[in-house]
Image (cartoon, rainbow, N blue to C red):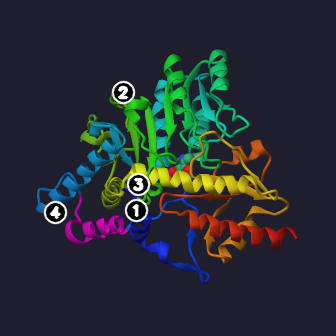
Amino acid sequence: MFDLARVRSDFPILAREVHGQPLVYFDNAATSQKPTRVIESISDYYDRYNSNVHRGVHTLSGEATDAYEGARVRIGRWFGVEDPGEVILLRGATEALNLVANTLVDSLKPGDVILVGETEHHANIVPWQQLEARIGVRVIPIPVDPSGALSLESAKTLCSEHPVAVIAVGHVSNAIGALNDVQGFVTLAQENQAYSVIDGAQAAPHMMVNVKELNADFYAVSAHKCCGPTGIGVLLGRRDLLERLPPWQGGGDMIDRVSFSGTTYNELPWKFEAGTPNIADTIGFATALDYLESIDFKGAVEHEHRVHSHLTEAMLSRDKVDVLGHPNHWVSVCSFNVKGAHPTDVGTLLDQLGIAVRTGHHCAMPTMEHFGLPGTARASVAFYNSIEEVDHFLEALDRVIGMLTD
Ligand code: PMP
């Protein structure tokens, strides 16, 4: 059973004060907090078995290799992927998306169209634009509908008009929090013999994701949004596709044999993991998923949904607040502006009251452009937040509104 009080005590940082006020951490879309267990798993690796993986015959290297490869299996299993060859450990969702765009280069030809959601994070836009400049593919945005979700109908029309080769969309948008119909986009990609690329950075910490059931070709995840450490993430991809793609970076671990007469490459997943991997944080990521399982993740998701609904209902009812979007399926985020005030001022004053929200364009400038805004303030909740914290935030926001607009 999900027990909020116990869960909160697992996160030491939640007990701290900011400017003499209890911290209310509502910046979970930027990064989540880490439970003690995750922090300890990382220091335990450095304390007891720090060693490089894969090539050592000594005990420590064997232990580090077992922990690293065991973490890979654990991470894959959380996302419904049983084959560790389909679990590529990378620096984060950004690197995962860059890997896909860069390795698809030989599978695409000039004139091919890449459909990219209009509300994507820059990490799922810029790599495709770089490919556009490099090989002459065309990037076309999938429009956002008035609710803030990506329009599947518009994507269908675009597919009937253009030679679409890739559909790259976010599972949940980080600037609005809209849950997109990714199943619809994956099916649409399949119907058009296009690759489906899903940015799961904002979905993974807020719901169970089964990449095999979704049948996406590529799915990118960031550990630091899922109570894991920064600097680690995963690309989950289909083995048959990954085998066809060329390696991306060259170096140790990704090779089979190196010779000046010709070099051959390692098998999956190591073909895409050049150099010493981020061993400690991979172990931390797997521990974070163990932790999520241990707290009754399903209960945690239900609780978070109640907290988020409480927040969005209250925000939508405030005359002096404009909320960005009102999706049918809305996850974690509430992006807003106080009428007549700059979001940075709102964020700065909330910080003085102990409340952490993010302000700005949220690495989603095209989303801001669509809505004609320079930026927003964004409150984003996680399962360890409480209804009381939302009420505290609302009281603080009302004070800030008074300060800025009276
Ligand atoms: N996509 C989305 C939707 C995100 O919110 C983020 C992180 N802000 C990223 C990609 C980039 O992820 P990472 O920090 O792991 O590189």
The answer to which image quadrant residue 227 occupies is: bottom left
Does the CB distance between marks 4 and 2 fall below 8 Å? no
Q: Please indicate whether residue 102 sits to the left or right of residue 397 in the image.
A: left
How many numbered discs sit on the rendered protein?
4
Q: Depth check: 356 or 129 in front?
A: 356
Quarter holding the C terminus is bottom right
Earlier-in-chain disc, 1 versus 4: 1
Q: Please indicate whether residue 342 sits to the left or right of residue 57 in the image.
A: right
Q: Which residue position is annotated with label 2?
A: 244
The percent position of residue 342, horizontal first and vertical second, equals 79, 63
Earlier-in-chain disc, 1 versus 3: 1
Q: Which residue position is annotated with label 4?
A: 60
- Give the answer, above or below, for where 22 lies relative to 38: below
- Give the answer, above or below, for where 73 lies relative to 52: above
* Amino acid beneath label 2: Arg
2 or 3: mark nearer the eye: 3
Whole-number angstrom distance, CA of label 4 to CA of label 2: 34 Å
Stretch of the chain drawn in magenta: 36-52
Earlier-in-chain disc, 4 versus 2: 4
